[in-house]
Image: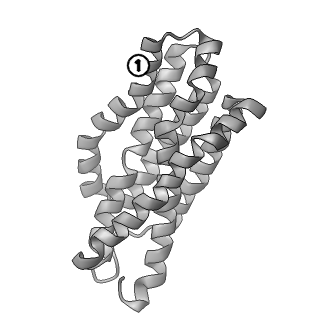
Amino acid sequence: MPAPSTARTFLKIVAALCTVYVMSQFFRSSNAVIAKDLSAEFGLSPAALGVLTGSFFFAFAAAQIPLGVMLDRYGPRRTVSVLLSAAVAGAVVYGLAGDLVGLIAGRALLGIGCSGVLMSALMLFGRWVPPAAYGTWMGRMIAVGGIGGLLSTTPLAFSAETVGWRVAFFAAAAITAAGTGLVYLVVRDAPPGHA
């Protein structure tokens, strides 16, 4: 834990990062739960579902090299805020999609948008906590992120059945937008006096 003078700021940073990491994990695994709905609505084959699901991960992976440059040049706060805006747009595009191309575009935007969350946390924790506490704080964040995986199971299935999967994605976009605003407002790239 950082010095008491910066502890409150650090805990706000952790809360903001955990919020968006939960949503990142939700988006990562949500397709498996609504696959039957997507197949029924769009007539998708198992191969098309595989491409659709994989588009998140391909975009996520492709974003990693430019992400590193952006983190070094612009810092975690600005980088993750901009990228999360792409995730918000991706959730909306996904919810509005009328065909497989629209779904893939939405999933790809989600992948790009979520690509910076964990890497930003790695960088921020490296600056805000002593090396001996680094693994503990990353472990805590990853554990909280598991809530996103849980939300993409029964709660998403229930939402898809009651209000529709599209409405669920619009709600997820709104939560992600709120988390993005939180990140922009509370995250600081380094504690006071950091070299």
Asked if residue 143 is positioned above or below residue 40 in the image, the reply reads below
Image quarter (top left, top right, bottom left or bottom right) of the C terminus: bottom left
Q: Residues within 10 Å of mark 1 (few under 14, many from 20)?
A: some
Given the current orientation, which residue lies at the most extreme front position? 154
Can you give x and y, in whole percent of width and height, for residue 98 in the image? 62, 15
**Total tally of numbered discs in the picture:** 1
Residue 109, horizontal then vertical, whole percent:
45, 33
**Amino acid identity at mark 1:** Val
What color scheme is it?
A: one colour
The percent coordinates of residue 191 (x first, y second) are 34, 78
Residue 195 seen from this side: no
Q: Residue furthest right?
A: 162
Question: Can the viewer see residue 130 in this picture?
Answer: yes
User: In the picture provided, is 38 more to the left or to the right than 87?
Assistant: right
Residue at image location 49% in from the left, 10% down from the top: 45
> Considering only vertical position in the picture, is 100 above or below 30?
above
Residue drawn where x is 53% and y is 35% of the image: 30
**In the image, 90: left or right of 114?**
right
Dot 1 falls on a residue whose secondary structure is helix
Left/right placement of residue 123 relative to residue 156 reads left
Q: Image quarter for residue 54?
A: top left
Residue at the disc numbered 1: 51
Q: Is residue 162 left or right of residue 129?
A: right
111 shown above or below 149: above
Task: Work out which quarter of the rendered image holds the N terminus and state it.
Answer: bottom left
Residue located 65% across and 14% down the image: 41
Residue 124: percent from the left, percent from the top? 33, 66
